[in-house]
Image: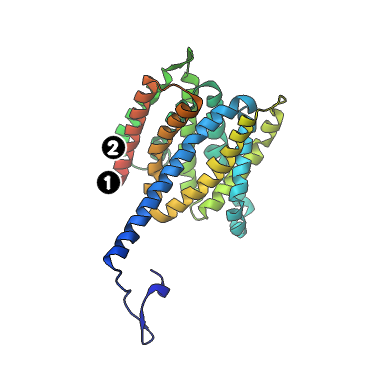
Amino acid sequence: MSDSECITVRGRRALPAAPSAGVAAQAVAAPSRRTLLELTLLGAIWGASFMFMRVAAADFGPFPLVEMRLALGALVLAPFLWRARARFTGLLWLRIAGIAMMNATVPLTLFAWAAERAPAGIGAISNGMTVMFTALVAFVFFGERIGAWRLSGLTIGFVGVTILASGRSAGGSVAPAALAGTAASLCYGVGINLVRRHLTPYPPAAVAAAALASGALLLAPLAAGNWPHHPIPAASWTSALLLGVLCTGFAFVLYYRLVARIGAPRTSTVTYLIPLFGVIWAWLLLGEPLTLTMGAAGALIMAGVALSQQRAARS
């Protein structure tokens, strides 16, 4: 509660006025409803990104599509970077550019490559491994304890990936796409650990803008060299724009708002919603089938995430 909300008596601050029962109930319930709504919205937006990649990847190719996504996302977040520009030295920009390769450019390209070759749900489900890979990388390279809960979660998650890779779509194997999505999640796991150790003193939204801009600059030569020469359908252009503006720029703004309000651990529960929405959007709007393999793999990977989160909550 701010100073302006306190009752002052004879020039001295007194205790805050006690709200009535009805007002107190509304003050507790409203933020809870808003948080639940925003978490669901964030999961729906990030889940939709796999559908948009599925629509646009075949027409643009991975490099041009990811280039547009990074550049548009950076533009949306540019005001945050502008406000903190004085803190971003040349050395910091180099550090961010290196981390951006692992935290944005490479994984997004792998997911776009996978989207060319398999249903959107494959990438969305494999993305669920990010939480477990983050714990594994922290254990292997940074000496953090992994514990029995996270180890169990990792094991179950890898079983889920194996089942996912064994599936087929339109008569062909989805293994290459599932493995590409898993490799992308591993990149995220590495990138998240690097951000935690090297970029936490800086405003996170500004760091995200700098990382997206750096990634776009690094990918630009490959994107230009592979830019499509054929006409691009309107649906693919729309999907590419939504990937950058909505699923990257706006989603990051919403994400950091949630982190500021409820903290990173609670915000990370959005991990459970992304595969769910990714599969649902692809089923509803693209007519992609829901297979038993996808269901079993998704359930196992989410169970692994749940064990990892339970370990974190108890520590």
Name the residue carrying label 2: 149
Q: Position of residue 223 (x, y in %)?
A: 67, 32
Asked which quadrant contains residue 276, the reply is: top left
Between 34 and 309, the residue placed more toward the observer is 34
Question: Taking 45 as reference, is 115 above or below it?
Answer: above
Q: Quadrant of the N terminus?
A: bottom left
Is residue 101 found left or right of 261 in the rendered image? Answer: right
Is residue 57 found left or right of 157 in the rendered image? Answer: right
Between 159 and 136, the residue placed more toward the observer is 159
Q: Are marks 1 and 2 in contact (CB under 8 Å)?
A: yes
Q: Identify the residue shown where x is 72% and y is 25%.
A: 229
Name the residue carrying label 1: 314
Q: Position of residue 306 (x, y in %)?
A: 32, 37
Q: Position of residue 121 (x, y in %)?
A: 45, 27
Question: Taking 111 as reference, is 218 above or below it?
Answer: below
Between 53 and 202, the residue placed more toward the observer is 53
Q: Amino acid at mark 2?
A: Trp
